[in-house]
Amino acid sequence: MDKRQRESRTDFRCGCTAKFRVHIDKTNGRWYAKLFSDEHNHELEDDKMCGMIAAHRKMNESDIMHMNNMSRSGISTPQIHNTFASQTGGYQKVRFSKGNMYNVQGRQRRMKKKEPEKTDAEFAISYIRGLGSKDPLLYCRHVANDDGNLDRLFWSDGISQLNYQVFGDVVAFDATYGKNRYKCPFVVFYGVNHHNKSTIFSTALVSNEKIETYVWLLERFLEAMKGKAPLFVITDGDKAMKAAIKQVFPNAHHRLCAWHILDNARKHVHIRAFNTELRKCMFMELDVSEFEEHWAATVAKFGWKKILGLRNYMKEE
């Protein structure tokens, strides 16, 4: 419209001289404060109400994803806002109002009419990237196949990366968690901290368990951890994993997971007493000579032929 005019709004300017001016020194690339004045000619807002100032109210991607998930479950917008307040410790700590939520929902409805609905994979990637607004160290990479479907997704948050720098000498990764609606293996990279508790370093979703897939995962893991490779890697003995470890972590020692060794013993050696002795050999605090003596006694007691299959499983190629 030629005669279109912006709707007039109330002018709240009061001539306050408070300001904070920051510049960058192009010679060394460092920022510095050039001017600062905290002299206000008006009363300042109470700390509890600062979050409701228009410039401070904003929903990030993770907040929107959380809101949409609850909305699809039949929860109303006011109840969703109450949930956010309960999770953050009070309404004054929520970074947005119910009006902001209604505005976001309205924009989503208008965009839905113009664009096709996002897939679950797109929502997942959008959610993880939204977490980056709270975590600047968040690392996320993904790859799509020729059909445009999600093929690989890898992510690691800042706390996990910091834990790896301290506890990352020994890393175990497992892909047995494949029970989800898409039948995609869920890969977890984890270790043990100084309290002997498991700590997660990174996680991933993959569409297959081929060698090139694991090579891609390990390369992303190495990139996320600033190039620090583990000294020992523990897996379930999968051949694709083993080949990928040799390629990406050539100096790391590959070991088999204790749980899978005991599980294999239970399946192939149907002698409960032997399984008990094997557990003692693996978990008792023994030096080398004591272990060899205990293991030799175990073999002599139960016979080598009965445990030959287990020996071949434990022996590295």
Image: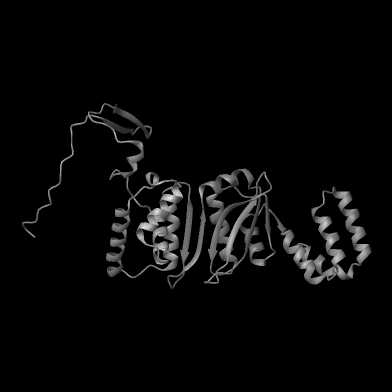
- Residue at the image position 5 percent from the left and 56 percent from the top: 3
Left or right: 224 in relation to 66: right
Residue 296 x/y as whole percent: 91, 58
- In this picture the colour scheme is one colour
User: Quick check: 12 above or below 298?
Assistant: above
Left or right: 33 in relation to 293: left
Residue 303 x/y as whole percent: 92, 67
Task: Quadrant for residue 163, please give it.
Answer: top right
User: Split into 4 quadrants, where in the image is the N terminus?
Assistant: bottom left
Q: Residue at the far bottom: name it.
A: 147
- The one nearer the camera, 101 or 232, is 101
User: Split into 4 quadrants, where in the image is the C terminus?
Assistant: bottom right
Q: Is residue 142 visible?
A: yes
Residue 70 x/y as whole percent: 42, 62
- The one nearer the camera, 262 or 149, is 262
Q: How many circles with numbers are drawn on the protein? A: 0
- Residue at the image position 65 percent from the left and 46 percent from the top: 193
Left or right: 207 in relation to 297: left
Q: Is residue 317 visible?
A: no
- Residue at the image position 80 percent from the left and 71 percent from the top: 268
Task: Quadrant for residue 41, please give it.
Answer: top left
- The one nearer the camera, 238 or 59, is 59
Q: Residue at the far left: name it.
A: 3
Residue 184 x/y as whole percent: 55, 69
Left or right: 310 in relation to 188: right
- The one nearer the camera, 191 or 82, is 82
- Residue at the image position 91 percent from the left and 54 percent from the top: 293
